Image: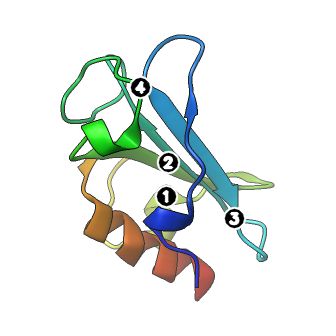
């Protein structure tokens, strides 16, 4: 099962770091941090190790599925998600 530690983060052209991963079932998770995303801190740093929380979004070939997959989600983007919370959401995606 894929977890946060398996994500490959890259520096973003507009600052901060980000990773996307598409699971075998076709669902993609985006995990972002920087001055724009809802992350802690909201600064453009160069490593995911520099952040304690991240912004995530989830979609498939038909569009956003964040609210469909994540219990209690009321938006397509979820901010301030810690590593354990992201691991839980990645597990939900993989079991969908």
Q: Dividing the picture into quarters, in which one does residue 77 lie?
A: top left
Question: Which is closer to the viewer, label 2 or label 1?
Answer: 2
CA distance separating discs 3 and 1: 10 Å
Residue 87 seen from this side: yes
| Percent of width and height locating residue 51 | 26, 40
Q: Residue at x 48, y 80 (%)?
A: 92
Query: Which numbered circle lies on residue 46?
Result: 4
Please report contact status of discs 3 and 1: CB closer than 8 Å, yes or no.
no
Residue 78 seen from this side: no
Please report contact status of discs 4 and 2: CB closer than 8 Å, yes or no.
no
* Residue 75 versus residue 3 in the image, above or below: above
Of the numbered discs 2 and 3, the one sitting upstream in the chain is 3
CA distance separating discs 4 and 1: 27 Å
Q: Which residue is drawn at 58% across and 85% down?
A: 1
Image check: 55 left or right of 28? Answer: left
Q: Which residue is drawn at 50% across and 48% down?
A: 57
CA distance separating discs 3 and 4: 27 Å
Image check: 16 left or right of 7? Answer: left
CA distance separating discs 2 and 1: 6 Å
Question: Which is closer to the viewer, label 4 or label 2?
Answer: 4
Image check: 64 left or right of 15? Answer: right
Query: Which numbered circle lies on residue 57?
Result: 2
Please report contact status of discs 2 and 1: CB closer than 8 Å, yes or no.
yes
* Residue 38 versus residue 9 in the image, above or below: above
Which residue is denoted by mark 1 in the rendering? 66
Q: Dividing the picture into quarters, in which one does residue 82 lie?
A: bottom left
Query: Which numbered circle lies on residue 27?
Result: 3
Question: Which is closer to the viewer, label 3 or label 1?
Answer: 3
Of the numbered discs 3 and 1, the one sitting upstream in the chain is 3
Q: What element carries label 1?
A: helix
């Amino acid at each position: 099962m894929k977890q946060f530690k398996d994500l490959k983060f890259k520096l973003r052209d507009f600052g901060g770091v980000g990773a996307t991963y598409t699971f075998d079932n076709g669902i993609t998770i985006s995990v972002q941090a920087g001055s724009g995303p809802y992350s802690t801190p909201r600064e453009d740093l160069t490593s995911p190790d520099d952040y304690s929380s991240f912004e995530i979004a989830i979609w498939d070939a038909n569009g956003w599925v964040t609210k469909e997959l994540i219990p209690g989600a009321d938006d397509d983007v979820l901010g301030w998600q810690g590593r354990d919370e992201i691991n839980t959401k990645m597990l939900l995606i993989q079991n969908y």
